[in-house]
Image: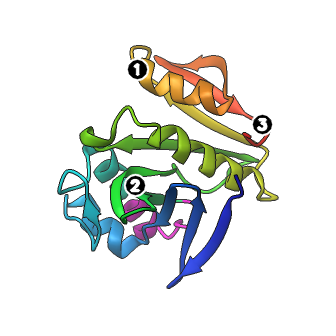
């Protein structure tokens, strides 16, 4: 499936198949960080804890003057009806060729492949950028669902980072 990247009101929008990833700029991220919907319709009414945490990272980066558009939080949206089912994105802009991803799904959206689709699209887009040579991800050892997402996308497990399992991807997923 082809990945389509576009801009909508200064936001990066990545679309592939049933999935739309819509960038959440710092103003929207501030609302999400407070647990508010930020003009999105959420499957469970409000964003999940992981999404609010990621939104806080975007707000902090903007406040520190290091936010770079395209390298923050995206809402994971069903293309069929525009409902947000989670958040996914980057922990910051590329650093020495590496960028780290994370993802969080609303409880009602889990188990339907949304995290795999979102991680795949993020990796395809990131590895197409000239400044990215590797995508990183970490999970807690007991988070089998997240590990399965990374394995489906094509990540390889590498040396642990402290108590977290670490993964790398160096070629775009199919």
Q: Residue at x 65, y 68 (%)?
A: 5
Which badge, 3 or 1, is on the more N-terminal residue? 1
In the image: residue 127, left or right of residue 23: right
> Dot 1: what SS?
loop
Q: Tags 3 and 1 in contact by the CB under 8 Å rule? A: no
Is residue 117 in sight in this rendering?
Answer: yes
Q: Tags 2 and 3 in contact by the CB under 8 Å rule? A: no
In the image: residue 53, left or right of residue 22: left
Q: Tags 2 and 1 in contact by the CB under 8 Å rule? A: no
Q: Residue at x 51, y 49 (%)?
A: 91
Which badge, 2 or 1, is on the more N-terminal residue? 2
Which circle, 2 or 1, is nearer the viewer?
1
Determine which residue is flagged by label 1.
143
Q: Is residue 157 above or below residue 71?
A: above
Q: For mark 1, does the 10 Å Cα neighbourhood hold few (<14), some (14 to 19), or many (20 or more) residues?
A: few
Horizontal and vertical percent for residue 165? 53, 19
In the image: residue 118, left or right of residue 42: right
Q: Which mark is residue 170?
A: 3
Q: Is residue 156 above or below residue 120?
A: above
In the image: residue 61, left or right of residue 100: left
Q: Which mark is residue 57?
A: 2
Query: Quick check: is 62 in the magenta stretch?
Result: yes
> 109 or 74, which lies in front?
109
Q: For mark 2, does the 10 Å Cα neighbourhood hold few (<14), some (14 to 19), or many (20 or more) residues?
A: many
> Dot 3: what SS?
loop
């Amino acid at each position: 499936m082809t990945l389509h990247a576009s801009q909508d009101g200064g936001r990066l929008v990545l679309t592939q198949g049933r999935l739309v990833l819509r960038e959440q700029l710092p103003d929207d991220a501030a609302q999400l960080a407070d647990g508010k919907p930020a003009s999105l319709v959420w499957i469970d009414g409000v964003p999940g804890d992981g999404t609010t945490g990621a939104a806080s990272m975007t707000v902090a980066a903007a406040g520190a003057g290091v936010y770079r558009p395209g390298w923050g939080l995206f809402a994971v949206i069903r293309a069929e009806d525009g409902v947000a089912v989670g958040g996914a994105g980057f922990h910051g802009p590329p650093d020495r060729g590496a960028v780290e991803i994370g993802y969080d799904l609303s409880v009602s959206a889990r188990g339907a492949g949304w995290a795999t689709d979102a991680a795949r699209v993020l990796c395809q887009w990131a590895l197409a950028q000239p400044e990215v040579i590797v995508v990183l991800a970490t999970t807690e050892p007991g988070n089998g669902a997240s590990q399965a997402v990374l394995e489906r996308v094509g990540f390889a497990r590498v040396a642990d980072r402290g108590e977290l399992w670490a993964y790398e991807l160096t070629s775009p997923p199919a």
